[in-house]
């Protein structure tokens, strides 16, 4: 582990980001109406196209993309500050989230000039929204065993298959799908490619999935003889595995892997300030603060690697795994603390936030790669397997 952590050298946010942080705080104070903690806990799952367009008006959607494609050309550190401030208040950023975080950067890195011109400016204006087309039924956490297939035709490609757990798929315009273009699932990483799929095309069916909280941010997508143009292919045929790992480095490295429970923690802290904190509450808060500070530093170090043009796949897996443990511990500790004195009744807002995050917490170690898969990657990075 020490060898791996050595690759995540201590890094700091540049002093210039502090002025930008103040700018972001000021924008949020003016643009974001008050809402209860359970609503704000949805944050990067909450689909609010109007709020995304407000951000886009400031140049903060696709913020790191080049100006010639409509982006603000901010560095990775400024994007870290932007995301951190939005998540810290539970802003509803789910509409543009995937396009900003990974689809746009993926197209910029691997897409053709025509694809960049077609999609990136619209992403930056929050006119189009993307979802992730990776997970499949019967594949579990084994991304390399995808069975959805695109077959070359005289018109381009014919796509058949199915994707699942696609966040906000029923509200988005496009997905970037990892599919097989040659071989069989037993061939693993060989023969995989990525395609931009317009979700309005004939043969595409998107069905929302209702979760335990009553939300329907997940969906499943069916492809039945979907005709794709030749230029739907991103990068080179057969390079999908390399490309998707670069995409996953973006997905796993950001501060959203630390802050999924932050609204609950903030709500509990406010409640303790009003009602008094026992010694075990203070000890729990101290542990949370120490863990969060360390994880945040690791995430900043990952950002430094991204800013240097690197693709820290294994390091991102490590931070995502550690961050998930922190996120899942928050509702468990808060539940235990509140139940330790049944004579003190928590307020309704705290209970609603706790109920929501407790129901969602098991998914934290699934999305973006399961704990088992990530630890396998970390073991390989350490030379243990």
Image (tube, grey):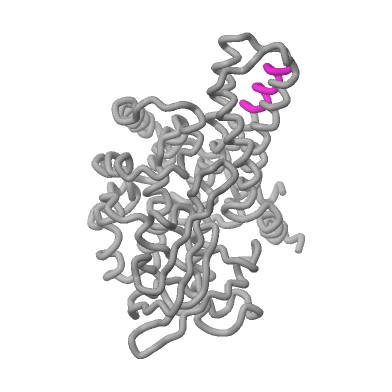
Q: Residue at x 33, y 50 (%)?
A: 62
Towards the viewer: 305 or 234: 234
Quadrant occupied by the C terminus: bottom right
Towards the viewer: 254 or 225: 225
Q: Is residue 146 left or right of residue 238?
A: right
Question: Which percent across, then down, holds residue 42?
Answer: 49, 38
Q: Residue at x 67, y 40 (%)?
A: 325
Q: Is residue 9 left or right of residue 95?
A: right
Of helix, strand and loop, which mostly describes the magenta segment?
Answer: helix
Question: Which percent across, then down, holds residue 90?
Answer: 45, 33
> Which picture quadrant has residue 164?
bottom right
Towards the viewer: 309 or 159: 159
Q: Which residues are magenta?
A: 280-289
Residue 319 in sight: no
Residue 242 in sight: yes
**Up-down: is 339 above or below 161?**
above
Q: Residue at x 39, y 54 (%)?
A: 171
How many tags in the picture? 0
């Amino acid at each position: 582990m020490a060898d791996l952590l050595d690759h995540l050298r201590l890094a700091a946010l540049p002093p210039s980001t502090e002025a930008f942080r103040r700018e972001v705080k000021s924008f949020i104070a003016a643009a974001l109406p008050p809402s209860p903690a359970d609503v704000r806990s949805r944050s990067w799952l909450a689909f609010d196209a109007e709020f995304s367009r407000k951000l886009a008006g400031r140049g903060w959607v696709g913020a790191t993309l080049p100006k010639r494609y409509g982006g603000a050309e901010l560095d990775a550190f400024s994007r870290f500050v932007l995301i951190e401030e939005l998540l810290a208040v539970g802003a509803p950023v789910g509409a543009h989230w995937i396009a900003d975080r990974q689809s746009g950067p993926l197209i910029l890195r691997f897409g053709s000039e025509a694809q960049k011109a077609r999609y990136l400016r619209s992403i930056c204006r929050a006119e189009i929204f993307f979802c992730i087309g990776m997970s499949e039924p019967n594949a579990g956490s084994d991304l390399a065993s995808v069975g959805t297939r695109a077959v070359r035709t005289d018109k381009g490609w014919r796509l058949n298959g199915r994707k699942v757990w696609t966040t906000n798929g029923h509200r988005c315009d496009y997905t970037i799908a990892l599919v097989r273009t040659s071989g069989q699932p037993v061939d693993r990483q060989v023969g995989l490619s990525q395609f931009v799929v317009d979700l309005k095309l004939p043969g595409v069916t998107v069905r929302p999935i209702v979760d335990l909280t009553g939300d329907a941010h997940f969906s499943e997508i069916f492809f039945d003889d979907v005709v794709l143009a030749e230029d739907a292919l991103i990068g080179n045929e057969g390079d999908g595995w390399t490309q998707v790992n670069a995409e996953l480095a973006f997905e796993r490295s950001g501060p959203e892997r630390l802050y999924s429970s932050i609204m609950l923690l903030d709500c509990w802290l406010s409640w303790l300030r009003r009602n008094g904190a026992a010694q075990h509450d203070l000890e729990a808060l101290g542990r949370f603060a120490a863990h969060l500070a360390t994880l945040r530093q690791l995430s900043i170090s990952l950002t430094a690697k991204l800013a240097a043009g690197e693709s820290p796949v294994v390091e991102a897996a490590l931070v995502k795994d550690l961050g998930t443990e922190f996120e899942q511990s928050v509702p468990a500790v808060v539940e235990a603390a509140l139940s330790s004195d049944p004579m003190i009744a928590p307020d309704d807002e705290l209970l609603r936030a706790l109920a929501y995050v407790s129901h969602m917490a098991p998914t934290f170690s699934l999305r973006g790669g399961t704990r088992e898969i990530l630890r396998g990657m970390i073991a390989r990075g350490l030379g243990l397997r």
